[in-house]
Image: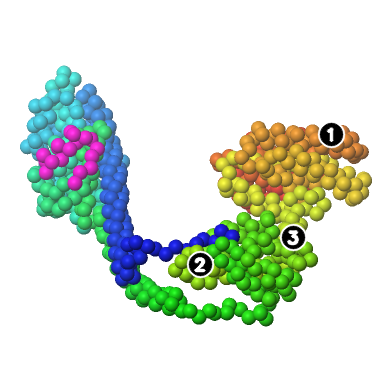
Amino acid sequence: MPFRKLREPDGPLRRLSPAVVVVVFALVMTACVLGVVAWKALDAKKTALARGQTDTLNLAHSLAEHATHAIQSADIAMAGMVELLRYREPLPERFNRYLADTVNSLPQLREIGVLDANGKWLYSSLPPALLHHNSDRPYFSNHRETPGNVLRINEPVQSRLAERSTIILSKRIDRQDGSFAGVLTAAIDSDYFDQFYRMYQLGPDGSISLLRDDGVVLIRWPLSEKSMNPAPAELFSRYPKQNPVGYNKITSPFDGIEKYIGHEKTRHFHMVVAVAISEEWLLSDWRKTLRTDAIVSAVLLLMILLLTAVLFTQFRFRIRTERALRESEAHYRLLTDNIADIIILIDARSLLRYVSQSVEQVLGLRPEDMLSKSCFDMIHPEDRESVRSATAQLSGIDAVCTVVFRTWRADGTLAWVESKYKLAALPSDPARAKFLCVIRDVTGRKRMEDELNQLNRRLTQIAATDGLTGLTNRRTFDDFLQRQFECCDEISMLLLDIDGFKGYNDTYGHQAGDRCLQAVAKVISDVTSHTSGLSARYGGDEFVVVLPDAGEDEALKVAEAIRLAVRGLGITNAVSSRGYITVSVGVASRTEAMPDDSALVGQADSALYEAKRHIRNRSIASSSLDLQYVDSESIQHNTEFATVERAR
C-alpha cells in the first residue's frame, strides 16, 4: 500500500525554533495585508481619477453642445434679420412685434434690437422708453470699422436696462452698396447659463466657465469676485489651440486650488467650455473607502497578532507532546478483541502487523493467517486504485481518510467494507511508521443505498416523462425552455398538432387515439434523437420540440422531416380529406425583439394556427407572419383562442 512516508525536516529547518517560525509567519502575513491594502488604495485612486476624467469630459461636451445650440439658434434668427434689413425698411410697429415674437420663442434671449449707423435705436423688442444710446459700446465701433456680417460674441457688459451681466451678440448691417447701415444686437443674460449650470453637483470648489477662445471669460459659475479676473485669459486661450478637447491638472487662477479641468471647444463658434473639479472633491469617496480599508487592515493585523500567539502556544504544546511520545517506551493496546469492527495495523511496507479477532466474525478469516501479508491481498483489484489515492492524502498525525471497497469472505463471497486510515504515531524514523485501519462491514447499507438510488432514478424519470407517449412532460419542457432561452442566443421551437385528431378519436375510439399519439410521439423522438433538442407532449394531441442553438432554416428542416415521417406512417383517418393522419407544424425562432420564452411559444402557436387555418399538413415559420409581441396574458389568450379554432 503506497502510504506516504513521513520525513522529518533536517539541516537548517530542523534547528528553527517555533518562535522563529511564528515570527516569520506574522511578518509575512502583515506584509501581505499591507501590500494588498496599498495596492487596492492605489488602484482605487487611479480608477477614481479615470472616472473623474471621463465624467468631466462628458460634462464639458454636453455644456459645449448646449452653448452651441443657444448661440446658433440666435445666430440663425439674426442672419435672417440682417438680410431683410439690407433690402427693406420695415415698419417699426410690425418689425418690433416680430422682434418681440423672436425673443419669446428663444428663451435664452432677453432682447433684440437694431442700431442705425449713428448708434440710435431703429427697432427693438423692448418699449422705446427703455432704450439707451449704444454708440459708445465697443461692438458698435468694431462693426462700423470692420466689414462682414460674422456673428460677434462680445465681452460681458453690465446691462443699463437690467443692471446685470449680459452677453451681447451682434452682427453688422450693410446697405445694398456694402456701406455700414447699423448693428443688430441680441442680449443673453448670464442667468440663463447660471440656471442651467447649477443643476450639476461639482463640489464646493467646482466651477463651470464659458470663455471665448481668446481667453475672455463670458460666464463662470458659481459667480465670485474673481469670476471675471483677466488673469486666466492666457491659460484658457492656450489649451484649445493645443487640443480642442483636453483634460489637465492645474492650480486654479480663480481660487488657487488644485483642480482637474476638462475643456472642449464649441464646433461653430470661438468659445470654450471648461469644467473644473477640485482634487479634494474628486477623491472624497476614495478617501472614505481608504479610511474603511485602514480600519479593516487594522482588524486583520490584530487578528494576525492573536493568531500568532495561538500558533506559538500550539507549537510549544505539540513539541512537548511529540517529545513525550518519542521517549515513551510503553505500548498501548489499540483495541480489545471484543470490538465488532476489524482493527488492523499496517507498517510502512503495507504489511499487516496486527489484526483483531473480530475479523473472524465479520469475514470468517483467522487473524494469524493474515499477518505479514500485504493489505492489498484483501482488496478487490478494481478498488485498489481508489484506496491508493485516498491513503496518499495522509499527511499528518491528525489526518484521516475513509474508503469503501470490496473484499472477500472466507467462503469466497464479496463483502462491502468501510475502512478509516490514520497514522498510529509520528516516529522519528519514517521507515518505522505505522498506520491504523478500522474496517466495518457495510454490505447491507451498500445494498440499501443501491436500491434507493435506483428507485430515485426511476422516480425522477417518471416525474419528467409523459405516461402515454414516453416523451418529456409539460412541466419538464417549461423548465428546459426557460433555461435554454436564458443561455442561448439562438433557439427555435416547433409546435405540432395532429390534424383532425378529435374526429379520429371520436370515430375510432380512445384506444386507437392513444395508439396514434404513441406512433406520432415515436416519430418525433426518432427524428430529434440526433439533435441537442428536447421533444415533449405539450397537451392533448399537441407536441413541442425545442432546438437550442438552431436557426429557423434548421428548425424548418426538422419540422418537414417530422411531417413527412408522420405521413409515412400511413395511419388511416376516414374523417380527414386526405384519408390519413397528418400533422401541422408552427416554427418560431428567437429574435432580438423577443422579450421572453412565452413570446417564443406564442409565435410558434400563431404559426401553427396559421398552418391549421389553411390546408393543414404543412409547416409554417412565424417569420412569414405579421406578428407583434404582446404581454404574457395576451399570449395566453391568443393561445387559448387558437386551440379552440384548431378543435373546430
Q: Residue at x 25, y 29 (%)?
A: 79
Q: Is disc 2 surrounded by few (<14), some (14 to 19) or many (20+) residues within 10 Å?
A: some
Q: State the residue in front, 526 or 322.
A: 322
- Residue at the far top: name it: 177
Q: Which residue is drawn at 15% across and 20% down?
A: 178
The region drawn magenta spans: 232-249
What type is the residue that disc 1 sits on? Gly
Please, what secondary structure does the residue beneath circle 1 have?
helix
Left/right placement of residue 530 relative to residue 8 reads right
- Above or below for 570 versus 248: above
Q: How far apart are marks 1 and 3 (CA)?
A: 38 Å
Picture coordinates of residue 2 (x, y %)? 56, 59
Q: Nearer the viewer, mark 2 or mark 3?
A: 2
Picture coordinates of residue 192 (x, y %)? 24, 47
| Disc 1 target residue | 568
Q: How far apart are marks 1 and 2 (CA)?
A: 78 Å
What type is the residue that disc 3 sits on? Gln
Please, what secondary structure does the residue beneath circle 3 have?
helix
What type is the residue that disc 2 sits on? Arg
Picture coordinates of residue 380 (x, y %)? 69, 59
Where is residue 114, by image quadrant? Answer: top left
- Above or below for 364 versus 590: below
How many numbered marks appear? 3
The mark that comes first in sequence, 1 or 2, is: 2
Residue 448 visible in this rendered orientation of the protein: no
